Image (cartoon, grey):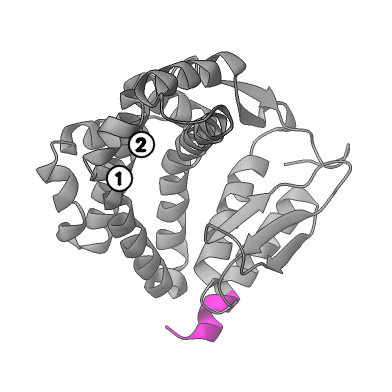
Amino acid sequence: MTTSLANTATAEIIARVEGLSGCPVLLLHDPTLQTLATVKAATRQHPTHLVRYRDNPDAAAYQIAFECGFLLRLFALPPGERVQLIGTPGARQAVFQELRRLRSDLKPGTMQSVVDMLYDGLMLQLRSCGPGIEVDNFLFAHYPQLRELQAASMTHQALQHAGTLNPDLDRQFPRAIVHASRAMNSAYALYAAELLGLPHLAVPYQSAGLESVGRELLGALFSSEDTADRPIVDAWAKTLGLSGHYAWVPVESPAPETVP
């Protein structure tokens, strides 16, 4: 693989997004990002898809393609079926109550900040992990030019996520959140291990007794005939005990004439 081939593949994916959605994709280099990349779909008021990425463009070619993969999945759906996940006040308050029971040492302002970090982080992981595996499947199958960058990124993420197995987290944070996050990390590591032929990526989760729930999540993902994001997320939420912790709301089409 060469850098030019990876960038060409990413450019092709961006063109597919623009053709499917009828909106341009704007790439913004933002070295201050806490994550590798983010995506914000176009709206009627802001009819441009915004992809932010942290690393230099050559290193970020896969990450940009990955974020665009979510846009391809979204705009492949009819406008009436496009939805986004939002949190609910009741679920957030339940996290607050549990954290207050565990961490009475935290000041009120700090308590709320930690609650927001935990709850919003979990909802983002639930929303993106299962559908993200589908995106990786798509990229791996159709864009071999990206595989070297894809393998490096997936390996790094799987190893980094193993930090959530730290037993200190069980004493500091609500058990339901810690368990759900670990289960999704296990599914990702098992998937990455098999896709990339790197079995050591799954070992930490196997040793922690999380292989079963990880494979259950992957089974729900790959056995469903409906591969849209919503049924994937709902199936994972059911397995993880998170049903009812979020809601789905319509996504506004960026233009009245948009046709998938």
Sequence-wise, which precedes: disc 1 or disc 2?
Answer: 1
Q: Quarter of the image holding residue 45? A: top right
Question: Where the C terminus falls, by quadrant?
Answer: top right
Q: Main secondary structure of the magenta part?
A: helix
State which region is magenta. 1-8
Question: Where the N terminus falls, by quadrant?
Answer: bottom left
Q: Quarter of the image holding residue 219? A: top left
Q: Quarter of the image holding residue 103? A: top left
Residue at the image point whose x is 50% and y is 67% from the top = 62
Of tags 1 and 2, the one toward the viewer is 1
Asked if residue 4 lies in the magenta stretch, the reply is yes
Asked if residue 163 lies in the magenta stretch, the reply is no
Q: Is residue 124 above or below residue 175?
A: below
Residue at the image point whose x is 46% and y is 39% from the top = 125
Q: Which mark is residue 132?
A: none
Instruction: Name which residue type carries label 2.
Output: Ser
* In-image side of 196 versus 247 (left or right): left
The x and y percentages for residue 55 are 55, 73
The x and y percentages for residue 113 are 56, 35
- Give me the C-alpha separation between circle 1 and circle 2: 8 Å
The x and y percentages for residue 16 are 67, 59
Q: Nearer the viewer, residue 11 or 217?
A: 217
The residue under label 1 is 164
Q: Mark 2 Cα within 10 Å, few/some/many (few <14, many 20+)?
A: many
Disc 1 + disc 2, Cβ < 8 Å: yes
Q: Is residue 58 above or below residue 199?
A: below
* In-image side of 183 versus 36 (left or right): left
- One can see residue 217 in this view: no
Residue at the image point whose x is 75% and y is 49% from the top = 21
Q: Is residue 221 above or below residue 80?
A: below
The residue under label 2 is 181
Residue at the image point whose x is 66% and y is 63% from the top = 14
